[in-house]
Each structure stands twice: as C-alpha cells, then as structure tokens.
Amino acid sequence: MSPLIRIQREDFSLQDEIDALSVGRSDIGAVVSFTGLCRDEAGTLAALELEHYPGMAEAEIGRVAEAAVARWPLLGLVAIHRYGLIRPGEQIVLVLTASAHRRAAFEAADFMMDYLKTRAPFWKREHRADGTLGGWVEAKGEDDDAAERWSR
Amino acid sequence: MSPLIRIQREDFSLQDEIDALSVGRSDIGAVVSFTGLCRDEAGTLAALELEHYPGMAEAEIGRVAEAAVARWPLLGLVAIHRYGLIRPGEQIVLVLTASAHRRAAFEAADFMMDYLKTRAPFWKREHRADGTLGGWVEAKGEDDDAAERWSR
Amino acid sequence: MTAAPAMTATGTRTVKLVYFAWVRERVGIPDETLDIPTDLATVTDLVRWLKARGENYQAAFAREALVRAALDHVHAKPGSPLGDAREIAFFPPMTGG
Amino acid sequence: MTAAPAMTATGTRTVKLVYFAWVRERVGIPDETLDIPTDLATVTDLVRWLKARGENYQAAFAREALVRAALDHVHAKPGSPLGDAREIAFFPPMTGG
C-alpha cells in the first residue's frame, strides 16, 4: 500500500478521494476522513494565506505517512494539503485512512493529523476583512503535546 | 445542535451529508467521518442482511448521540445506519462529527462508533455466494472493550 | 406511553413481546401479545416464565446470559424491574456498525 | 543529491539557504546561495555565523530557540551536524493542518 500525498493550491473533493480509494474493492471495512476547514468565528478574516516549503512538504508528509503504514494495517492512506489563499469555510487539509477494521483507521488518521500539525512545513498568516495583513499564526503547545502522545 | 439520525434501507452520500452540515458556515474547523463498509475478504459473501429493531434503533442511536453532544463541543453530528441486504463494498454506516477543533471531532466519532457497535439494535447475517444462508455474525468481545474505554 | 398497563382481575397484564435475529428464529415468531402475571418482577423472572411455556422458548433462552433485553426501547439488564413496560424485546448481542 | 559538496581551497563550501514565514521576512530574502566555512559543525554554529553577518539575521534569529531548521528537507535540531547538507532551511514552528 503506497500512500497518496498531494500538496496543491486547488480545492479537493472528499468523495472523489474516497471513491478512488475504495470503489471495486471488498477488503476495506472502515474509512475515516479528517477535513480541516478555514474558520472565522470573529467575522474579521478575509482569508488565510498558507505558505509552504515545496519539496520538503511532500517529503515530510510522506515520512509521516510511511510511519503510519508501518504502525497500522492500512489498506489506503491519502493526505492532501492546500497552500495559497484559503477563505473562511474552505477546506485546507484532508487525511483519509482505510483499513479492514475501525480501530486502525481511526488511530492512523488521528496520528497523521497530529504529525501534520507539528511537522509539515506550512505556515499560516491572516488577511483581514478590513484589507490589512494580520500576523503569522502562532504554533500551539497543545499540538506538540498531541503529537507526543504517539511516542508514549 | 441537534444530531441527525437516520435509519434507512437506501445508500447514502458522505459528500451530501458533509455539505448539508458545513456549507455556508465558517465556525467549523474540523470534520471527521467514519464509513463502515461491507467486507468480503474470502470472496464467499453474496450480501450481509442487516436486521434491526425499528423504533429502538432510532431511539438508542439518538441517546448515544446526545451523550456525545453533552461530552464534546460539537457543531454537527450525523449518524446513518442502513438495514436490509448490503453487498460487499457497499456502505453500511456513517458517522460524521464537526467541531471547531480536531480533538473533539475525532473523539466524538470514535465514541459514536464504539457505542453503535455495542448498543444499536442491529444484527448481521451472511448470505453466501453459493446461495446458502450463513449464520448470524457473532458479537466480538473487543467491541465491548472498546465501548468500555469511554467510561474510564 | 401514557396509558396505564392493562390489568386484569386475576393479576395479569398485557405486554407485547418482540424477538430479533436468532432469538426470533428459535421462538418461531417475530412478536406476540401475551398476558403475563403481574408478580413477574424482573427480566429474568419473565424469561423463566417464558421457558416454562414451551420448547421454542427453552431453545431461545437456553443460555440466558446470551440474550439481551430491552424495555420500551431501552436496554435492560437481567435484574432490571419490568415496571410497567408495554413492549419487551429479546435479542442476541448486537452486531451493527 | 549524489554530487559532493563544492569545496574551495580556503575551507568553505557552497550551500543554499532558504527562509520561510517571518524568518524570511526578517532576513529580507526567500533564499540565497552562500559559501560557508567548513568548520561550522552544527545548525547552531551556522546560526551564530549568520548573526555575525548583519542585523537582518540578528532580527531573524533573535530568539534562537524559536527558529526551526531542516537539512536537505529533513527536520534538524540545533545540535544536529550540518554534514554535507546542500539546502539548509530556517523557519518558525509550523502551523499547517
């Protein structure tokens, strides 16, 4: 099973990715998806700008995916991360895991997201609705703590 | 937030359910989906027949959903369970959770599935490819153990 | 369920019993309406009363611990009081999801 | 990366440095190709050598512990040996996902 990693500016379709993974197979019993969306609770955000490190982004997510494949009996693994300007309500990231049983699919998707948050070379900054450029989003200590769970 | 529970013979579309949950909103940061599919690794299965207890199925899944809503800060919760004849590769069950952040969405979806497995009144039996009727699928002790995790 | 249980002068009340999966197959019918004695206190009491009624119930409840029950759509334990439940269901451990 | 690092007679080698997010903004350029002394052993050695080059680097690395590094697309620690890395990146803690 070879993970599918894509770093792209364009939006993605969860349904298309699930279909590509599962149509015509009968060995998959469980598919878990995680979709990360651009939030704007305060109503002050025009868009998030996602900067990334081309080359390393693919390589690093690939390494995290290989670690997941080594750890859980996966039948499919997809990770898609967008860059560029992303507006409130739009999709940013997708992780899709497939396995015979639900535990592996849940754990692998959870693991992938924790590591994407702390290891994938992406940086967010805010473009505000009033036309000004906001600051760079700061990393959260809780994300490091979440990733740390998997080495216990 | 009122959970959406559906017990139906027809197939469902994950994309339609996600769209219904999230389109036009910018408060959702994380959506987790679990899809359970009919497996047939041995190639001997014509279909699974899912019997259910009408009335109680909706009520019990509703109670599990309310427990999830009370426990996690959810912005959306969908649970769909099919009954009737389901062929290998077809979808059986969908759980969809939405929240501002990923931890709540992951945990609530995981919780919902553990409880659906052990508490939702559905029973599977096999229809074999050779035309014979197989036995009723036996419950797995590991499912009880999985549900037990949430009361610790 | 606002109506009071139907009581008879001889100390019975009317309930609907429903069966699923192999419990249904062994009992031989999907559901039935029965007058049960009002002195049956718990789920286990009802199971034992049913087993005295015939071989089909004995087959269904041969291993009592394997059969689950619900009272008016709510899961019950063997020791749960029947209360004024109107619909009592028996079924194997669930295998949905 | 099969080519050997470009060594000069005076003990320097050529590397590409790349910067991201506010590290990029403070350094003032997205990337540059520099000849660095071969006796810089670790990521921290390189950071301190850069800080001696100008105020822009001092601003970018004012709090050294806040800046992360990667050697040829692989995360590195402050004490990691530079080895023969050809592309060395500096950036803030990541906020993707």
Image (cartoon, coloured by chain):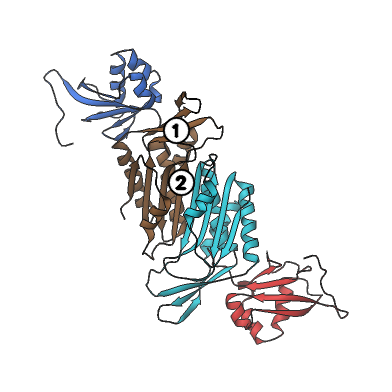
Chain colours: A cyan, B brown, C blue, D red
Answer left or right for C42 relative to A11.
Answer: left
- Are the residues at dot 2 and dot 1 in contact (C-beta closer than 8 Å)? no
> Could you say where residue B86 lies in the image, as x and y percent from the top left?
43, 36
Quarter of the image for residue C12 reads: top left
> Could you say where residue B99 lies in the image, as x and y percent from the top left?
41, 58
Judging by the rendered image, the residue that carries numbered circle 2 is: B35
Which residue: 62% across, 80% down?
Answer: D60
The amino acid beneath tag 1 is Leu
> Helix, strand or loop at disc 2?
strand
Q: Residues within 10 Å of mark 2 (few under 14, many from 20)?
A: many
Quarter of the image for residue C75 reads: top left
Q: CA distance from mark 2 to mark 1?
A: 16 Å
> Helix, strand or loop at disc 1?
strand
Q: Earlier in the sequence, mark 2 or mark 1?
A: 2
> Could you say where residue A41 lies in the image, as x and y percent from the top left?
38, 68
The amino acid beneath tag 2 is Thr
Which residue: 50% across, 31% down?
Answer: B45
Answer left or right for C52 relative to B116.
Answer: left
Q: Quadrant of the N terminus of chain B?
A: bottom left
Badge nearest the viewer, 2 or 1: 1
- Tell me: residue C90, above or below residue A3: above
* Disc number placed over residue B6 in the picture, else none: none
- Tell me: residue D45, above or below residue C10: below
Tell me whether marks 2 and 1 sit on the same chain: yes
Residue found farthest to the left: C9
- Tell me: residue D84, above or below residue B55: below
Judging by the rendered image, the residue that carries numbered circle 1 is: B48
Which residue: 59% across, 72% down?
Answer: D92
Check the residue under mark 2 and report the chain it is in. B
Instruction: Depth check: give the residue in front, B78 or C76.
Output: B78
